[in-house]
Image (cartoon, coloured by chain):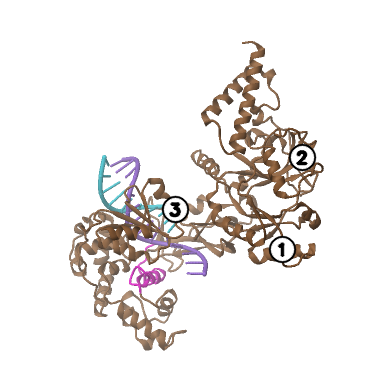
Chain colours: A brown, B purple, C cyan
DNA sequence: CGCCCTCGAGTTCC
DNA sequence: CTCGAGGGCG
């Protein structure tokens, strides 16, 4: 092959790849498959390796970057890179607009036009183009001076090296956000996990860390991308509005977020803020709010700056899903089965609207795996929008004063020695008399799903124990109104309610009572299977361990636990006392195995119009099974309002998903 | 024996 | 909701 034809092929490939990049990163509309892209890229690399003299700085292969020497030099920003003022809530946003009005001498009637943009959670950068060519990329730094990270910026494919403008201005500065797509972030962490490396905490920090890599090759290996949101030009400013500058950036070849919306007034801006709050989870990038800018550039000029922030823009911040806080202490909870679980007491912080002050650390192994110490700064988030969890410790924030937590060898409630059976994750207090366990067991007994005794909760149980009125669950049924009235915060009326609730609870379905007794390995499902098999407490008491273990889905471990519980002298006394107190469970029917929905299994999730147990009872009456988790074997997942991961899982597994309405229709059909 | 499906247990906040 | 572990099945 002649040198000339090689040169031609190289030039052609470069043009092709640049076009592919443009279509992929900027238009978000790939013109070729990934394979075709790789083939072209590979061919170009091959030719360039064979002919290194033909490599030019602007070849797409050079995006992987040449090594950089030493620290990042600082650069002076041509225009200061300011930060935005944060506003939280509608009230603060209205206050902000009122300040604008005052400054512009506008009356309350005059509407101001705004542009709303999703606020991408990434790293702000400034990009300078001279005569259409990228010459400098820098971080925000202190606003006046930033770090020169040009080498790393050039590895980001979404950032054009050359503007796609016929006539490029002598100088143009574009600002925007470098970020990592959520899907890419997950892939990245998956790989880290497979390789046994430390996981990245969140996309934002990872993006920030990535552009500050010493070796541009390391940056190139990270899936970074970019959105432009601001144009800075000293000359050639024929633009009247911010929106026009965004269109111009788009024409110039920058990716601009397509969700940007023009709002005629603050009301529309607030609508966007509300819309985005629900929409943002759908997008493949993390956002922590909405940036609201005055659209008119004339007005922007007139408004100017206060200190280091422009008056004409505001960052509306949503309540964050993740927060940094401090571990004040680590404590131990004793559960009803004696399980010792560590809890972190945290400096209270707001997450997604609620104040969080503690988080479970699950067990000893988890505590050590995450290496959580008292005094540590930690990132916490809400798993499934509700339950706080510690994501990771900020190791860089340690100063040596942090104290490691040593798992106790004695129960903090009763002092008995604890045990951790070989191969198990849970440390247990095995003292049957342990007061903490007793209290938890009593709480469990009265709780919803168990005996469901109205008006008796954690507080009252604690009071009754302290007053010496109850020791075991049977004692509850001997309580009198007079005894209750003597307690604090308990008047005639409430006392009567408690007595009535106890009276009403004396004939529970057998399964409920079995579950309420708190026998190890007996949850709601197993309790129902046992109740259906034996029908009455008496039959169960006469059953052998093998008979119990022989029930399908019950098995030897639960079988042994039940038999041992029944044989325990103390438990036999409790059962006698319950009977003496008038507690007589209803005899249970054998499980229904026929009916129109026989053999079908249902999972209910999200907020439905009635309590979930009611739906579960309904399908069970028709011969179906109600389960808590979705798998390939699930027939229907009925989804209510704000569903969680179960709806998603159903989608993935191709399980039929029904809305409540569709579910009702299904029942009507049969 | 290993894998998948379920269930149990502990947990937070309003 | 999540983790761990029991139960069933290949």
Extreme-top residue of the structure: A2
Chain letter, disc 1 residue: A
Q: Quadrant of the N terminus of chain A?
A: top right
Secondary element under disc 2, as helix, strand or loop, is strand
Chain letter, disc 3 residue: A
Rendered location of residue A57, percent (x, y):
71, 26
Residues at marks 2 and 1, CA–CA distance in whole angstroms: 30 Å
Classed neighbour count for the residue bearing mark 3: other residues with Cα under 10 Å, few (<14), some (14–19), many (≥20): few
Q: Earlier in the sequence, mark 2 or mark 1?
A: 1
Q: From the viewer's perspective, is the residue at label 2 or at label 3 nearer?
A: 2
Residue under pointer 2:
A172
Q: Magenta region: which residues?
A: A429-452
Residue A79 left/right relative to A570: right
| A443 in magenta | yes
Residue under pointer 1:
A97
Residue A566 left/right relative to A184: left
Residues at marks 2 and 3, CA–CA distance in whole angstroms: 45 Å
Q: Are marks 2 and 3 in contact (CB under 8 Å)?
A: no
Q: Can residue A125 be seen from the camera position used here?
A: no
Chain letter, disc 2 residue: A
Residue A503 vs residue A271, the one in the foreground: A271
Please determine if labels 1 and 3 lie on a single subunit. Answer: yes
| A191 in magenta | no
Rendered location of residue A515, percent (x, y):
31, 66
Residue under pointer 3:
A645
Residue A76 left/right relative to A557: right
Secondary element under disc 3, as helix, strand or loop, is helix
């Amino acid at each position: 092959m002649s040198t000339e034809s090689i040169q031609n092929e190289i030039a052609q490939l470069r043009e092709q790849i640049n076009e592919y990049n443009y279509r992929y990163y900027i238009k978000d509309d790939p013109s070729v498959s990934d394979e075709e892209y790789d083939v072209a890229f590979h061919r170009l690399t091959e030719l360039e390796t064979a002919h290194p003299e033909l490599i030019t700085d602007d070849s797409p292969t050079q995006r992987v970057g040449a090594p950089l020497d030493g620290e990042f030099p600082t650069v002076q920003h041509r225009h200061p890179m300011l930060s935005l003022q944060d506003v939280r809530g509608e009230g603060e946003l209205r206050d902000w607009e009122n300040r604008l009005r005052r400054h512009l001498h506008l009356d309350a009637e005059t509407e101001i036009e705004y542009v709303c943009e999703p606020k991408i959670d990434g790293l702000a950068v400034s990009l300078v183009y001279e005569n259409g060519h990228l010459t400098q990329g820098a971080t925000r730094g202190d606003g006046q001076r930033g770090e020169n990270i040009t080498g790393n910026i050039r590895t980001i494919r979404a950032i054009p090296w050359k503007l796609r403008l016929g006539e490029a201005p002598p100088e143009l500065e574009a600002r925007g956000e470098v970020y990592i797509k959520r899907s890419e972030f997950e892939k990245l962490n998956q790989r880290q996990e497979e390789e046994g490396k430390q996981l990245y905490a969140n996309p934002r920090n990872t993006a920030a860390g990535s552009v500050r890599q010493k070796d541009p090759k390391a940056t190139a290996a990270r899936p970074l991308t970019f959105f432009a949101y601001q144009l800075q030009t000293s000359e050639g400013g024929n633009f009247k509005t911010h929106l026009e500058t965004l269109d111009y950036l788009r024409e110039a070849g920058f990716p601009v977020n397509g969700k940007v919306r023009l709002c005629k007034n603050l009301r529309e801006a607030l609508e966007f803020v509300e819309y985005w709050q629900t929409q943002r989870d759908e997008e493949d990038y993390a956002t922590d709010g909405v940036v609201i800018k005055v659209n008119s550039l004339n007005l922007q000029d007139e408004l100017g700056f206060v200190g280091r922030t422009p008056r004409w823009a505001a960052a509306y911040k949503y309540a964050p899903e993740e927060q940094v806080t401090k571990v004040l202490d680590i404590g131990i909870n004793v559960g009803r089965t004696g399980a010792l679980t560590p809890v972190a007491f945290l400096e209270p912080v707001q997450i997604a609207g609620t104040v969080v002050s503690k988080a479970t650390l699950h067990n000893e192994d988890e505590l050590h795996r995450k290496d959580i110490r008292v005094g540590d700064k930690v990132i916490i988030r809400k798993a499934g929008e509700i339950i706080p969890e510690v994501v990771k410790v900020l190791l860089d924030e340690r100063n040596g004063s942090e104290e490691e937590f040593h798992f106790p060898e004695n129960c903090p409630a009763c002092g008995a020695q604890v045990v951790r059976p070989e191969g198990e994750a849970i440390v247990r207090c095995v003292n049957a008399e342990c007061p903490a366990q007793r209290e938890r067991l009593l709480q469990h007994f009265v709780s919803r799903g168990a005996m469901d005794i109205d008006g008796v909760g954690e507080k009252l149980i604690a009071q009754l124990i302290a007053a010496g009125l109850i020791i075991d669950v049977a004692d509850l049924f001997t309580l009198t109104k007079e005894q209750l009235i003597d307690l604090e915060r308990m008047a005639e009326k409430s006392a009567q309610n408690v007595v009535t609730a106890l009276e009403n609870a004396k004939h529970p379905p057998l399964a409920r009572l079995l579950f309420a007794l708190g026998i190890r390995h007996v949850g709601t499902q197993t309790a129902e299977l046992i109740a259906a098999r034996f029908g009455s407490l008496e039959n169960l008491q006469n059953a052998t361990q093998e008979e119990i273990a022989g029930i399908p889905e019950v098995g030897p471990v639960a079988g042994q636990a039940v038999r041992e519980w029944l044989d325990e002298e103390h438990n036999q006394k409790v059962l006698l006392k319950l009977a003496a107190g008038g507690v007589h469970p209803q005899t249970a029917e054998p499980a229904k195995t026929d009916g129109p929905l026989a053999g079908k299994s249902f999972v209910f999730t999200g907020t439905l119009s009635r309590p979930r147990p009611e739906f579960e009872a309904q399908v069970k009456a028709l011969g179906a099974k109600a389960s808590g988790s979705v798998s390939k074997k699930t027939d229907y997942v009925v989804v209510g309002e704000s569903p969680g991961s179960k709806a998603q899982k159903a989608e993935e597994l191709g399980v039929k998903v029904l809305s409540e309405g569709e579910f009702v229709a299904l029942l009507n059909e049969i």
